[in-house]
Image: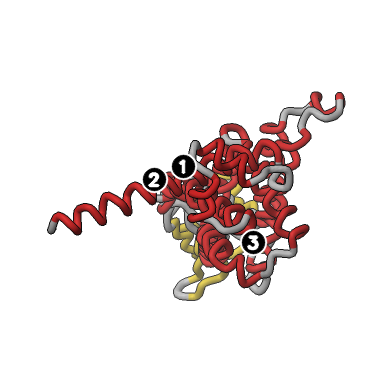
Amino acid sequence: MTALEKLAEERDEQKSARIDRILAAAFKLFSSAGIEPVAMTDIAKKAEIGVASLYRYFSTKDEIAIRTAIWAWEKQISEIYPSINNDEYTNGNGLFRLSIIFSLFKKLYMSQPEFLRFIYFFDSYAVNSGIKQERMIEYENVIGKVQMIVADAIKLGLKDNSINKKYIDKTENLYFTLMHSFFSTAQKLTLSENLLAMNEKSKGSDQLDLLSELLLNGVRKKAMTLTKIDLTSSTTYIGNINEYGEKTYSGRFEKLIFNNEYSSDIECQKLNKIDTINIYYGQNQLGQV
């Protein structure tokens, strides 16, 4: 690398660091007071740069608001990835992955409420300022990374039978319904959790836990109850086989109640802890649990 190239690289690094400082300053101001009341001079002062320097990087407040939103989401996504790039997540079924995603947004509510406030203020500002969709493309692309994570969990759940197949033609609506419900509730709690005395009766974190449970129960595949006799040990098992494959027993069974009907010579095959149970009569598959 030549001396000129090194100098150019140093300048690029300095420019990148300065932009990051500007966006961090804007985020603090916007998430605290909203975007409307904040002036470019306020941002310059917070970032400890001159107003003229600020305008060299961002010509309008609309531009800095959009860039700050992109910066804020990218920061959150970088913190999400470690939680989904591990064996526990990748080995889990679709419903389990959704539960992890909900837990991450609950963690966001508890540890970084300023992000949820900022997104609320940004959405309001973008609508009130009439920012056109074509100016929001880069922002939408960043949010699309989160949508892909959730959509992949839903698709996997439909494939592995942990999510009810009645939603198979409604995957996009399912994504928006689940995420809007959870994200909007977290935002509401962040903005006005203690506004009224009645709100103090229920913790926001408890409400998000309950909402997660309700949403997951709403989309999960319903379990079936089976009664079976294991001839190898002459032991009768009566119990529930749920969507995670718990309480299952492999082997051959003389009788098994399946859909309230007795069948004989049935082989019940346990695939794995997070998969479905296939029930066979000879080579013919009778159904799945």
Could you classify mark 1 by the number of other residues whose Cα lies within 10 Å: few (under 14), some (14-19), or many (20 or more)? some
N-term mark: 1 or 3: 1
The quadrant holding residue 4 is bottom left
x and y, in percent, of residue 162 in the image: 57, 58
x and y, in percent, of residue 259 in the image: 67, 62
The quadrant holding residue 233 is top left
Residue under label 3? 175
Q: Which mark is residue 17?
A: 2
Inspect the image, locate mark 3, and give the three-letter code of the amino acid beneath it: Tyr
Residues 176 and 77: in front is 77
Residues 34 and 287: in front is 34
Q: Quick check: 27 above or below 58?
A: above
Identify the image quadrant of the N terminus. bottom left
Identify the element where label 1 is drawn. Answer: helix
N-term mark: 3 or 2: 2
Could you classify mark 3 by the number of other residues whose Cα lies within 10 Å: few (under 14), some (14-19), or many (20 or more)? some
Q: Which mark is residue 126?
A: none
Mark 1 in CB contact with mark 3 (< 8 angstroms):
no
Residues 150 and 246: in front is 150
Q: Is residue 245 visible?
A: no
